[in-house]
Amino acid sequence: MSQESNEQSLWYTENLDVGQIFCPTKQKNGMHLKNTQEYKKGEYIYLPGEAADSIYFISSGRVKVGHYAKSGKEITKAILDEGELLGELATTSHDEKRRDFAQAMSNTTLCIMTREEMNEMMREHSGFSTFLMKIFASRILKMEKRLESLVFKDSRTRIVEFLLELVEDKGERVGYEWVVRKFLTHQEIANLTATSRQTVTTVLNDLKSEDILTFDRRRLLIRDLDRLKAETAEQE
């Protein structure tokens, strides 16, 4: 799925521009929406135990959502980019506390909406509730797929499946190839696939030597998507 079609199907729900709702260019009917806030690279947006009373829209930048195990090990659950939401737990309960942390991976600007503002938006825009349901369903499916992959797939397959997911979610077709901009580091991919940085490096270099893809710090270029998909066929 191209980036453009993904935006049309997700962020524009029933002719509703979700980005404009979270980051309005002007106030509507005098209503004050939660302000825009900037975070520097490495700064935490929220931590476990804090009140889950706001939802965040990424206006620019990149955010990591994760959890700290009792051993202190960091578990990365998601890496989110411009145009995506985090903190959606605020919609589920008035008494919920954050279970995860969210940290800016680059200088990041967020538009913040409180639970009360969010409830008012859902009353005013029926499509907004539909949009939130799509977000929840999409993330549940991704987590289920990721859990199945951890249980049943080997390290190489998990990494390849993650690359395919990147292309589906954030890829842009360029001729016969696919490009994913703002490519992740090898350590970030390792954290998301429960592998090691060395394994990620080995797999990427193998795929590069086979002319299936190429990459650098700025982008991932898939030269042959069919051959990349074939890498997972034996594990199906």
Image (cartoon, rainbow, N blue to C red):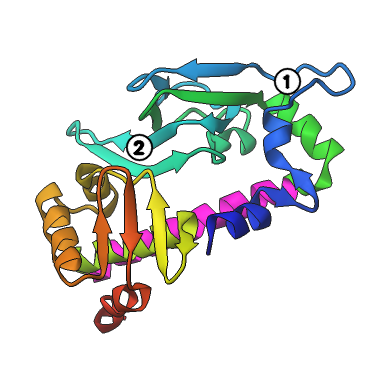
Identity of the amino acid at label 1? Leu
Residue at 32% across, 43% down: 218
Tell me: residue 21, above or below residue 168. above
Which residue lies under the disc numbered 2?
Answer: 66
Query: What stretch of residues is rendered in magenta?
Result: 129-153
Tell me: residue 130, above or below residue 229. above
Q: Give the left or right position of residue 119, taking residue 90 as reference.
A: right
Give the overall secondary structure of the magenta segment.
helix
Which residue lies under the disc numbered 1?
Answer: 33
Label disc, if present, on residue 231 of the rendered structure:
none
Residue 93 image position (x, y, % from top left): 62, 34
Q: Residues within 10 Å of mark 2 (few under 14, many from 20)?
A: many
Identity of the amino acid at label 2? Gly
Residue 101 image position (x, y, % from top left): 39, 29
The reply to whether residue 30 is in sight is: yes
Residue at 53% across, 64% down: 1
- SS at mark 1? loop
